[in-house]
Image (spheres, rainbow, N blue to C red):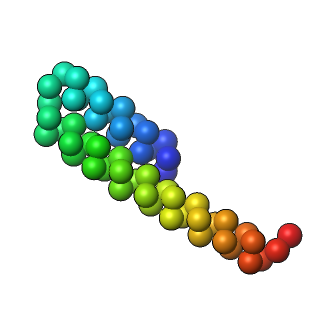
Amino acid sequence: MLSWALTFFIVAIIAGVVGFGGIASASAGIAQILFFVFLVLFAISLIARVARGR
């Protein structure tokens, strides 16, 4: 999931440099959503691991 967010972020940077503003903003938005989904899933997995014990 984090790799997809990074991929969309790189696409957004490249599109912004080339001058495609609409594509850049859409890719940045998708990257932001994927990053926050990654953070939520990561936090849930950490909480589950602590709750389960060793």
In the rendered image, residue 42, in percent from the top left (x then y), is placed at 58, 60
At horizontal 51% and vertical 64% (from top left) the residue drawn is 40
Left or right for 38, reference 27: right
Look at 49% across and 57% down and name the residue there: 38
In this rendering, would 36 be left or right of 15?
right
User: Left or right: where does residue 32 sit relative to residue 41?
Assistant: left
Residue 50, x across and y down, in percent:
75, 72
* Residue drawn at (43%, 52%) of the image: 35
Residue 16 quadrant: top left
Q: Is residue 47 above or below residue 14?
A: below
| Residue located farthest toward the right when viewing the structure as drawn | 54
In the shown orientation, is residue 51 left or right of residue 11? right
Furthest toward the bottom, the residue is 51
Name which quarter of the figure residue 6 lies in: top left
Residue 12: x %, y % from top left? 28, 35
| Count of numbered badges drawn on the protein | 0
Q: Residue 11 lies in what quarter of the image?
A: top left
Q: In which quarter of the image is the C terminus?
A: bottom right
Q: Which residue is drawn at 44% across and 60% down?
A: 37
Toward the top, the furthest residue is: 18
